[in-house]
Amino acid sequence: MIVLGIESSCDETGIALYDTERGLLSHALHSQVKMHAEYGGVVPELASRDHIRRALPLTQKVLSDANATLGDIEAIAYTQGPGLAGALLVGASIAESLAFALDVPTIGVHHLEGHLLSPLLEETPPEFPFIALLVSGGHTQLMRVGGIGDYELLGDTLDDAAGEAFDKTAKLLGLGYPGGPAVSKLADQGDPKRFKLPRPMLNSGDLNFSFSGLKTAVLTLVNQHQPLDEATRADIASAFQDAVVEVLATKCLAALKKCRLKRLVVSGGVGANRQLRARLNAKAEQKGIQVAYPRLEFCTDNGAMIAFAGAMRLKHGGKADHAFSIRPRWDLAELTAP
Ligand code: KG4
Ligand code: ZN
C-alpha cells in the first residue's frame, strides 16, 4: 500500500510517500525557519499561509521523485494534532480533499507517534518493547513502548521541554531561532567545566524532568558576565548543554533499568544533539544497551514519520467519510493499538 504523508503541525511542511512493501519512496520538506526568524519564533498565521503555498508543489515533487502519479496513492495520512490549529487545518483539509478526489482512505496521525516511530524507518529498526525518549520543542517524555499504540508514560517534564530550554537559552545568549542547533554549535567551542549549572531533578528518584530552573541559572550567569565576550558565551552554552545532556542520559538509563529493557529509542528535535548522542552511545556501550535514532533529518518535523506511522495504522483500516477535525491538544497516552 502506497501512503502519502502530510505534516503541517508547526513550521515545516513535510510530504512523503511510503510503501508498506518497499519502504520510504520519497520525501520533501520546506522549512519556514527563515520566514519566522525575524520574529524570534513561529507566527501561527504566517505558518498556515505558507503550508497552503507549499503542500501541493511538494506533493508533486515526491510523486515525481518516486516515479509515481496521483493515481498510485492508495491512502493518505496527515498530522491531526497536536500543533497549531490553523497549520493543522491546512494539512487536514488538503489531505481529505485529495483523498475524496482519489477515493482513498485517510488517517489522522498523532504528531508525537510520528516522532516516536521515526527510528523504525531506518535499516535495522529496533524491536518492541523499548524505552523511548521523546525530546522536542514541546515535549520531554520517557515512555515504555510495547507496540504501535501501546505507550506507557514513565516520566514527563514538569515545566519547560528540553528543546524549549535550548531555544530560551539561545535567546539569552543572543542566538537566533531555532536555538537548539545554534546553542549546540556554540557549546562545542566552549569549556563545559568553567561554569557548573544545576542538574535539575537528577536525583529526584522518579523519571520526571524540570528545565525552567536551568534557564534561570543561565540568565543569572549572563547577567553576571555583562558584557558577554565570545568565550564566555560559548562556556555558558557548553555548561547548559552539559547539564541538559547529563539529566536526559541519566533518566534514560534509569527508565531502562526500571523496565528491565536493553533497547532505547531517541526521537524529536533534541535527539539531533551531537553531545546527547555521544553520551548515550558511550553509556549504552558500557551497559550492553542498543540505542536507535532516526537519521538526523528525521529528528525534526518531517513527512516521512507521518506517512510511516499512518501506514502502520492504515494496515488495519482507515477512514472513508472525509469529514475531519483537528486536535491541537492531544495526549499521546490516549492512543490505543490499531
Ligand atoms: O521535533 P521538533 O522539530 O519540533 C517539535 O515537535 O517540537 O523539535 C524542535 C526542537 C527545537 O526546540 C530545537 O531547538 C531543538 O528541537 N533542536 C535541538 C537541536 N536541533 C533541534 N536541540 C539541541 N540540539 C540540536 N542539535
Ligand atoms: Zn515535532
Image (cartoon, rainbow, N blue to C red):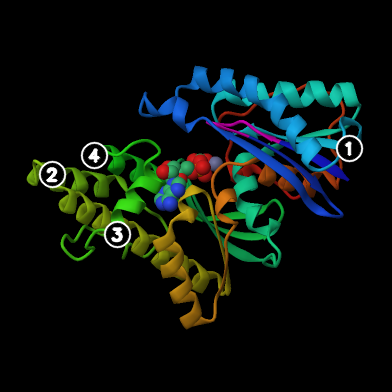
In the picture, measured across the screen, residue 163 lies left or right of residue 131, that is left
Callouts 4 and 1 close, C-beta under 8 Å: no
Along the line of sight, the residue nearer the viewer: 53 or 97:
53
Q: Amino acid at mark 4?
A: Leu
The quadrant in which the N terminus is found is: top right
Q: Amino acid at mark 1?
A: Glu
Residue shown at 36% from the left, 42% from the top? 179
Instruction: Decide: is 133 above or below 1.
Output: below
Which tag is nearer the camera, tag 3 or tag 1? 1
Badge 3 density bin: few <14, some 14–19, many ≥20, Cα 10 Å:
many
Whichever of callouts 3 and 1 sits on the residue coming sooner in the sequence is 1
Residue shown at 61% from the left, 24% from the top? 51
Q: Amino acid at mark 2?
A: Leu
- Which residue is labeled 2 in the image? 228
- Which residue is labeled 4 in the image? 172
Which tag is nearer the camera, tag 3 or tag 2? 2
Q: Name the secondary structure under disc 4.
A: helix
